[in-house]
Image (cartoon, rainbow, N blue to C red):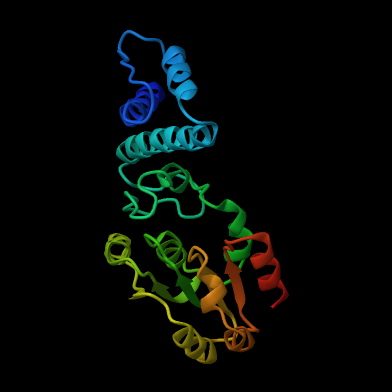
């Protein structure tokens, strides 16, 4: 029931304004033109390699509108899934409101849940490297899936959000800044054998996860979101 059309038209208006400086000037009355006509006009004026980017931007605009509206309707409380009842879901520094719907509905990266929350499992320690706004760090501690939680996040605004989320849900976690390779090696050496590591650091995993770390964390469970090229990922898997 949310207004998808307005979100798309807002993005179209931005594109039309930027196009006027690069291509033939054109004027569009968004109130009188049908959505199909506006889309046809804008897309025909854009080079082919820009069309995909435009459509993605339009989808992102819609997700932000939908996410912000859903946060209001849900009062920032997770409505379903394993973290049901978790409070304080809000705008993220990294993704705006785009991930809010899946977090509030309990479907955010749900393919990871069997690895993060095996039935009857309690981790000795949880380390979130690239913790973002603290969804996993706070959620897993709230559900008593980990005895202790340490979060690493390079962005100061996101670190503040993690603290706010932890406070809203009355859980204690340790929050650090950007993770360093040597620091992780030392932690792996002292962590319990039954510890969980979650890495989501946008490509830096190839640099920060060293051979020494992998040896010391060999008895732990590592969940790593890999980026880069297929060659990068293949070499990393071999390690």
Q: Nearer the viewer, residue 99 or 9?
A: 9
50 relative position to 85: left or right: right
Outermost residue, top side: 32
Image quadrant holding the C terminus, namely bottom right
Residue in the picture at 48% in, 83% down: 181
Q: Nearer the viewer, residue 107 or 231?
A: 231
Vertical position of residue 191 compared to residue 11: above or below: below
> Which quadrant of the figure has residue 130?
bottom left
Confirm whether residue 230 shows in the render.
Answer: yes
Image quadrant holding the N terminus, namely top left
236 relative position to 159: left or right: right
Residue in the picture at 41% in, 33% down: 62
Vertical position of residue 191 compared to residue 134: above or below: below
Q: Position of residue 79 (x, y in %)?
A: 43, 44
Q: Nearer the viewer, residue 131 or 208?
A: 208
- How many numbered markers are drawn? 0
Q: Position of residue 84 (x, y in %)?
A: 44, 51
Residue in the picture at 47% in, 14% down: 36
Vertical position of residue 192 compared to residue 25: above or below: below
Q: Nearer the viewer, residue 20 or 192?
A: 20
> Which quadrant of the figure has residue 165?
bottom left
Q: Position of residue 166 (x, y in %)?
A: 32, 65
Q: Position of residue 67 (x, y in %)?
A: 38, 39
Confirm whether residue 117 shows in the render.
Answer: no
Vertical position of residue 158 compared to residue 210: above or below: above
């Amino acid at each position: 029931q949310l207004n998808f059309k307005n979100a798309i038209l807002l993005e179209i208006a931005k594109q039309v304004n930027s196009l006027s400086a690069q291509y033939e000037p054109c004027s569009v009355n968004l109130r009188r033109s049908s959505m199909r006509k506006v889309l046809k006009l804008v897309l025909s004026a854009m080079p082919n390699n820009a069309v995909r980017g435009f459509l993605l931007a339009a989808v992102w605009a819609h997700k932000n509108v939908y996410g912000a509206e859903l946060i209001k309707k849900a009062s920032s409380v997770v409505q379903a899934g394993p973290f049901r009842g978790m409070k304080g879901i809000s705008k993220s520094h990294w993704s705006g409101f785009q991930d809010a719907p899946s977090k509030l509905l309990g479907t955010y990266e749900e393919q990871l849940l069997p690895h993060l929350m095996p039935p009857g499992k309690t981790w000795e320690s949880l380390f979130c490297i690239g913790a973002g706004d603290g969804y996993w760090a706070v959620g897993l501690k709230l559900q008593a899936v980990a005895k202790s939680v340490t979060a690493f996040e390079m962005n100061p605004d996101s670190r503040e959000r993690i603290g706010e989320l932890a406070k809203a849900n009355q859980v204690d976690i340790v929050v650090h800044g950007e993770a360093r390779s040597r620091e992780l090696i030392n932690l792996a050496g002292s962590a319990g054998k039954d510890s969980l590591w979650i890495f989501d650091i946008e490509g830096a995993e190839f640099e920060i996860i060293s051979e020494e770390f992998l040896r010391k964390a060999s008895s732990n469970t590592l969940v790593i979101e890999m980026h880069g090229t297929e060659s990068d990922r293949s070499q990393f898997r071999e390690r």
